[in-house]
Image: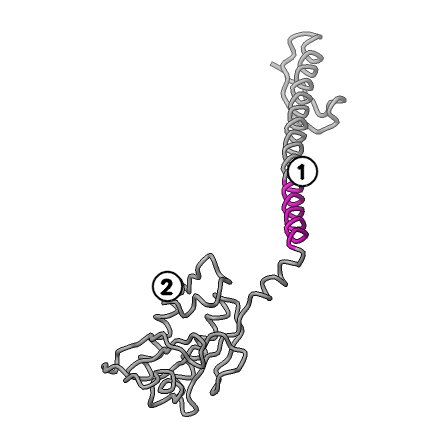
Amino acid sequence: MKASFLFRTSLTDNWLGILPIPRQGKRSLPCFVAVLATIIYLNRAFTVLHDLKNLYLIGIAIMRLHNLLFVHALSILVSSATTGIPIARARAADQRHVDVLIGQDASNLEQFAAQQLCYYLKEIYDVTSEPLFEPRLDAHIKLIVGRPTTNSTVARALAGTSWPEMSEQGIVLIPVQLDDKPALIIGGGSDRATLWAVYELVERWGVRFLLDGDVFPDDRGGDTSDCVDI
């Protein structure tokens, strides 16, 4: 059986390769070409329709996302307008000053404990503070780090109350009043225990210490008066 070869079709204008076509009559070649060209044409048509469908679905998704962002932005503007002040300014107005107090003779470990306390105050309550030796007049809350032998403010805040007996690993969290303002003594039987007391307090604020990092509570930026409510 002899074979002829087809190189190109006029409908698709694409090389199809070399196809052996049996010679069985004068109409065999035109019919084969027509059928093959029709199949290729339909395949191309279905491909185009599929692409158009995908583009249509992508367009719908983009329009929905645009509408969602617009509604969200509008809700923020309405909320700001009804309160009369911007949201950022409202949060700043509610912020209260918090003192972190250490002794002048505090060890490096106690200073680090105070710095850690300041870090978590910022992360949880959005309050910027730094270790101080003396309380500020405008401070509404005072966090006192150490024990009577390392921080004289602890003895003043105890107001005659004796320091509890404990081992070097013992920790204390004692709510007190200092200059008629709420305060909290954060200390322990040693400098290392004082650091543990800071982490104990931070844990009560809602932080979880995991191997891959700290997990903070979802409701951050709350009322700073909660930081002494243990």
> Magenta stretch mostly in which secondary structure?
helix
Image: 130 above or below 31? below
* Residue 63's disc number: 1
- In space, the residues marked 2 and 1 are separated at their CA atoms by 41 Å
**Residue that appears at 64% across and 8% down:** 24
Image: 181 above or below 153? above
Does the CB distance between marks 2 and 1 fall below 8 Å? no
| Amino acid type indicated by mark 2 | Leu
State which quarter of the image contains the N terminus: top right
**First in residue order: circle 2 vs circle 1:** 1
Instruction: Locate residue 11: give its quadrant.
Output: top right
The outermost residue toward the front is 180
Residue 51 x, y percent position in the rendering: 65, 31
What's drawn in magenta, residue-wise?
65-83
Residue 5 drawn in magenta = no
* Residue 215's disc number: none
Residue 139 x, y percent position in the rendering: 51, 77
| Amino acid type indicated by mark 1 | Met
Residue 224 x, y percent position in the rendering: 48, 67
Label 1 element class: helix
- Identify the residue position indicated by label 2 in the image: 210
Q: Residues within 10 Å of mark 1 (few under 14, many from 20)?
A: few
* 51 on left or right of 171: right
Q: Residues within 10 Å of mark 2 (few under 14, many from 20)?
A: few
